[in-house]
Amino acid sequence: MSIQEKIAIAPHLVFDAITAGVPGAPLVLLLHGFAESMHCWRAQVAALGDMGYRAIAPSQRGYSAGARPDPREFSYYLIDRLMDDAMAIVAAAGYGSARFHLAGHDWGGSIAWGIADRHHERLASLTILSRPHPNAFNRALMADSEQAERSKHHKAFLEPDAADVVLADDAKWLRERLTANGVPADAIEMHLTVLGNKDAMEAALAWYRARGAVRGPLGPIRVPTLYIWGDADDTVGRGAAEGTVDFIAAPYRFEVLPGVGHFAADQAPERVCELMLEHLAAHPA
């Protein structure tokens, strides 16, 4: 069973989180992407807690009202700050220098790849949903016009009125996007309790507006990695997904979910839980 908690890493950075499991048990940190929230991991958090792990899924910087620096100052949302938040949450949860398991979806996947590159000695395992290794993604963007078309929404999110567009007509754009990717209606409502207001949406979009300073190419990943990709993902093509293997220098498992879209944890929660639990058991902390 999961509960909601608040995790403070500084007086002005207090994160909402869903958690399960006994503090001190092997830690699994789960990082969400856009346009979702901590709630995308609710099934996985519960399953991990039931299996003896300590699972923590925070709503990240900007998504949590208590951790929302001014989104007009993009430097507050640089990827290095987002990675630092994740590591500080681990420390605040009582895991200091201990090894832990890390999972990330979409933008959370980008952060997780960066942490695996920078702090590989801290990770027992890495689980990524949808987001390819950044080097594979960038290679596909340059070589594959289809991937560029899939990623064109990134530019739209840079427009000054992007938050208003996404939230117009009772968040019609957001509801339609999630529905088209098989996200259940109750999950959509949960995500809207976090993102369905202008302040939160502006902060979430600040992640995109700050990405001009994204770190350069990553090195080969030296952490046992599970990469889960749905073959109906409308933002990540097969070339980028299959190309991720070229940038892993550790045990690697690539799982394709037939008919599953971009938001696999919400659309196929049982299968994602099954794959994660197998992966974590194979690479204990």
Image (tube, grey):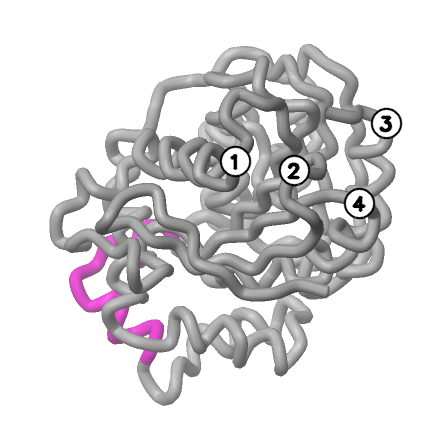
Element class at badge 2: loop
Image spot of residue 284 (x, y percent): 79, 26
- Mark 1 crowd level (few <14, some 14–19, many ≥20, 10 Å Cα): few
Asked whether disc 2 touches disc 1, contact meaning CB atoms under 8 Å apart, the reply is yes
Please give left or right for residue 202 compared with residue 232 in the image: left
Q: Earlier in the sequence, mark 3 or mark 4?
A: 4
Image spot of residue 201 (x, y percent): 31, 66
Q: Which label sits on residue 282?
A: 3
Q: Residue at x 82, y 42 (%)?
A: 277
The residue identified by callout 1 is 94
The three-letter amino acid code for the residue at tag 1 is: Gly
Task: Please give the range of residues in magenta.
Answer: 154-167
Please give left or right for residue 177 compared with residue 215 in the image: right
The three-letter amino acid code for the residue at tag 3 is: Ala
Instruction: Tell me the chief SS of the magenta region.
Output: helix
- Mark 4 crowd level (few <14, some 14–19, many ≥20, 10 Å Cα): some
The residue identified by callout 2 is 24
Q: Earlier in the sequence, mark 1 or mark 4?
A: 4
Establish if 246 lies above or below 158: above
- Mark 2 crowd level (few <14, some 14–19, many ≥20, 10 Å Cα): few
Q: CA distance from mark 3 to mark 1?
A: 24 Å
Establish if 183 lies above or below 146: below
